[in-house]
Structures are given as C-alpha cells and as structure tokens.
Image (spheres, rainbow, N blue to C red):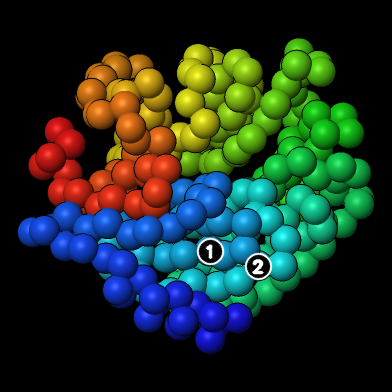
Amino acid sequence: MKMLGLLFLLWSAGCISAAGQERTVALDGIRLTTVDRAGDFYAITEQYIYKFDSLGRPLDSVAVDVPVTLFDPGNGVRMLAYFRDKQEYAIYSPTLDERQRLGIDASFAISPWLVCASGDYDLVILDAADWSIKKVDTRRSVVSSEFTLDPEPGKDADFIFMREYLGFLFIHDRNKGIHVFNRLGMKLRTLPTDAESFYFRGEELYYYTQGALHLVNLYTLEQRVVSIESSSRDVVLGVGTAMIVTNHGLEFRPLSKIF
C-alpha cells in the first residue's frame, strides 16, 4: 500500500505546476477533503487517502479496501477513518501508516452510521438504529456518556458528517444543515446550509457554497462571507494556504488571494 503511495508521489510530481506559491494537482474522483491543525491537507477518493503539506506538495498516500465514510484528522498525529461498509475504523499515523483497525462492538451501536474521534483516544458514535449518540472510552471499552437525538430525525434525515470541536459536537444533515450540541447532548442550534461539507479555523466554522465562503464564529455567531469563483467545488483553509477543490483536482493558493 505504501509502495502505491510512493508511485502516486512520483506521478504527481509531473502534474504539479507552480506559479509563485500556487500549485495545481490533477486528481480525479475526490470524495472527501479536510485539513489538520498543522495545516496539512487530505484528499480522499474511493481507493486512496492522499496527504499534502501546507504548501500543497504531496507527502504520502495510502490505499483503502473500501470507501472511507468519514475522515477525522484530529491533531494530525492520530487520525481516524471510519468505513461504514465494514463497520470498522482505522487509526493512521502522520505518515498514513495504519496503526490499528477495529470493529464497532454491537454493544455500543447496532447500526453505526457515523464515527468520529473525541480527544486523543475516545470515539463518538451515531447509531442509526435508535439515533443515539454514544461517547466511548476506548481504553476502558465503556460508554462514558450517551444521549438521543430529539426530536427523532425521521426518514428525511441524511447525516453525512460528524465532528467534535472545542467541546461541541457537530452533526451535518444534508437536508437541514449543521446541528450543534453541547457536552450534555443539548441541541444549541442548527446552522442552515446546503453545503456538502464544513471545516474549522480557530473559533470559526466555515463552509463553501454557491460561489462563497461562509465563516461563522462559534461563540458570537457573527458571520462573514467571502466570494470565490463559482467553478470551485469546495474550499479548505490551511495555514497560509487554501486548498481549492475543482472538477479536475486541487488548486493550492495563498490565503492572501482568498481574503
């Protein structure tokens, strides 16, 4: 798997054009993207997880045997990928070596729909069987807290992403928006959006839709909007650089050209 990643790096080196600090990478079939705290970017296709540094230079890649449902970079040291087709999650190192792969115990969730990281070692599981949320202490193999989504989502719910950040839990329903819960499981608000994904930057949550980047302060709810050309599919902000997802691959631009 790592040899395949090396071949990708050698291939991509011939497909990157740099003009100043701008870079373009040809990559088909991008399904998921994200960024870690250090500003390293990740792009995920049906068969691979690709990692790029904060300037858009390819670092590594790893093949996956089934599509990744959710990828949580955590702090960039212990990254989690959830595979719903197998009801398994894998832990990756910073160089995308698979350190661990485990199944979801049926005592924790009958139908685990989404799984993300909580802190360095714990899990948050959304169980579609009863729409419960369980936080699991993986070192002791016990449920440390639990609550049920209220009201029950119903058939119109389409949960596509979940992440814990700054003590809040964010669950993305494609049909309604991003639901925000506190540590006690109390729903605080829903941020309506038709975006396909969302990310975090400091105290802000942001998402890209209809040619604009929307940034929301998590504490004051103050919002700002930055226009970006509509040919972009998604925008991910790093440390000094933005990763633009297009129909043909990725473009890396200095943040000074975004804001």
Q: Residue furthest bottom?
A: 3
Which quadrant of the rendered structure holds the N terminus? bottom right
Q: Residues within 10 Å of mark 2 (few under 14, many from 20)?
A: some
User: Callout 2, which amino acid?
Assistant: Val
Asked if the residue under mark 2 is in contact with the one under mark 1, i.e. CB atoms within 8 Å, the reply is yes
> Could you say which quadrant of the image residue 82 lies in?
bottom right
Residue at image x 38%, y 43%? Answer: 246
- Nearer to the camera, 145 or 161: 161
Q: Residues within 10 Å of mark 1 (few under 14, many from 20)?
A: many
Q: Where residue 42 sits: x, y (%)? A: 44, 58
Q: Does residue 231 appear in this view?
A: yes
Residue at image x 46%, y 49%? Answer: 33
Assign a secondary structure to mark 2.
loop
Q: Where residue 120 sits: x, y (%)? A: 55, 60
Left or right: residue 115 versus residue 232 is: right
Which of the labelled discs sits on residue 138, or is there none?
Answer: none
Q: Is residue 215 shown above or below 46?
A: above
User: Callout 1, which amino acid?
Assistant: Ile
Instruction: Work out whether mark 1 precedes mark 2 in sequence or the reverse, and give the earlier one.
Output: 1
Residue at image x 45%, y 82%? Answer: 6
Q: Which residue is mark 2?
A: 64
> Could you say which quadrant of the image residue 225 lies in?
top left
Q: Does residue 188 appear in this view?
A: no
Residue at image x 22%, y 58%? Answer: 23
Assign a secondary structure to mark 1.
strand
Q: Which residue is mark 1?
A: 49
Q: Where residue 157 sits: x, y (%)? A: 72, 21
Number of marks drawn: 2
Left or right: residue 130 versus residue 213 is: right
Left or right: residue 45 versus residue 109 is: left
